[in-house]
Image (cartoon, rainbow, N blue to C red):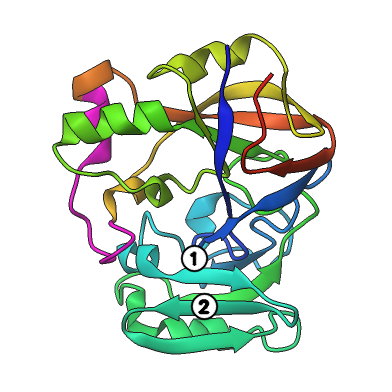
């Protein structure tokens, strides 16, 4: 099997924005360094910095308007952007309340509102209770787009690493053994079962597709992408070959 690392995405704040990267460091303890390093608890969640399931945070599955947020890590913190907001450049460690106020009515009024921005444990506040790296296949994304009758933006899936050069759905074969990208080795864990988050368009922040229905009608699955653990750390960069 041959493939190339085509895109890298990191999410400084869980569920709120994503940034394209040319390279990232991977570690066994932290997965993608800087990914989901912060998360915004909702008012009904336990007030702790420990790992919690995604339902306890502000995230796209419950607030689709958040899909249109962009996020970039800066030297002093995080820069958030949205089509209907002035940019917010803030330091989460010194001004944690800024993001909740900035989000405002991007979050549904009938949902528990923002409470506290928490600093994630070393593994990041990922959707699974272990340090995970998510990997997707661009050929599968193209097949999904064809089935949906529209161009499906890769950002909908909030996947870290996207491979090109594989056949559609060939990523399932990656579950059979460890892989190497750049100087890092990763071990497969399980497919990623999807929720409603990919229904939201990252350009508009509105739901315009039922992604679960497309997956089920086309391939009798709710899975898209694969979770990996980092077996040995290293740096990965766009253009790296899969082995």
Mark 2 lies on a secondary structure that is: strand
> Which residue is at a point 72% across and 31% down the rendered structure image?
229
Compared to residue 161, the image places residue 21 above or below, namely below
Residue 97 in view (yes/no): no
Foreground pick, 46 / 168: 168
Q: Which residue is mark 2?
A: 80
Q: Main secondary structure of the magenta part?
A: loop
Locate the C terminus by quadrant. Answer: top right
Give x and y (percent) for residue 77. 70, 79
Can you tell which quarter of the image residue 31 is in? top right
- Residue 17 badge: 1
Q: Are marks 1 and 2 in contact (CB under 8 Å)?
A: yes
What residue is drawn where x is 24% and y is 35%?
A: 145
Q: Position of residue 55 (x, y in %)?
A: 48, 54
Up the image or down, 108 lies above or below 227; here it is: below
Mark 1 neighbour class, 10 Å CA radius: few under 14, some 14 to 19, many 20 or more? many
How far is mark 1 from mark 2, CA to CA? 7 Å
Q: Earlier in the sequence, mark 1 or mark 2?
A: 1
Considering every residue shown, the one lying at the far front of the view is 239
> Is 57 positioned to the left or the right of 155 in the image?
right
Instruction: Look at 38% across and 87% down and name the residue there.
Output: 85
Which dot marks residue 230? none
Residues shaded magenta: 201-216
Quarter occupied by residue 20: bottom right
Task: Using a 10 Å C-alpha cutoff, classify the residue at mark 2 as few (fewer than 14 neighbours), some (14 to 19) or many (20 or more).
Answer: many
Q: Where is 156 relative to 60, above or below?
A: above
Residue in the foreground of this view, choosing between 16 and 154: 154
């Amino acid at each position: 099997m041959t493939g190339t690392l085509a895109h890298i995405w990191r999410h400084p704040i869980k569920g709120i924005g994503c940034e394209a990267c040319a390279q990232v460091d991977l570690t066994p303890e932290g997965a993608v360094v800087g990914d989901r390093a912060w998360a915004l608890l909702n008012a009904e969640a336990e007030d702790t910095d420990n790992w919690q399931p995604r339902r306890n945070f502000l995230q796209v599955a419950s607030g689709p308007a958040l899909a249109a947020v962009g996020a970039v890590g800066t030297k002093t913190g995080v820069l958030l952007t949205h089509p209907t907001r002035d940019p917010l450049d803030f330091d989460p460690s010194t001004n944690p309340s800024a993001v909740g106020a900035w989000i405002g009515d991007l979050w549904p009024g009938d949902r528990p509102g923002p409470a506290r921005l928490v600093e994630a444990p070393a593994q990041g506040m990922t959707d699974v209770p272990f340090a995970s790296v998510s990997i997707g296949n661009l050929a599968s994304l193209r097949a999904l787009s064809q089935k949906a009758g529209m161009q499906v933006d890769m950002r909908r899936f909030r996947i870290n690493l996207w491979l090109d050069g594989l056949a559609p759905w060939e990523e399932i074969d990656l579950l059979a053994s460890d892989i190497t990208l750049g100087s890092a080795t990763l071990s497969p864990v399980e497919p990623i079962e999807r929720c409603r988050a990919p229904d939201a368009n990252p350009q508009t922040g509105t739901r315009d597709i039922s992604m679960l229905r497309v997956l089920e009608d086309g391939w009798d699955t709710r899975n898209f992408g694969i979770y990996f653990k980092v077996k040995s750390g290293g740096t990965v960069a766009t253009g790296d070959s899969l082995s």
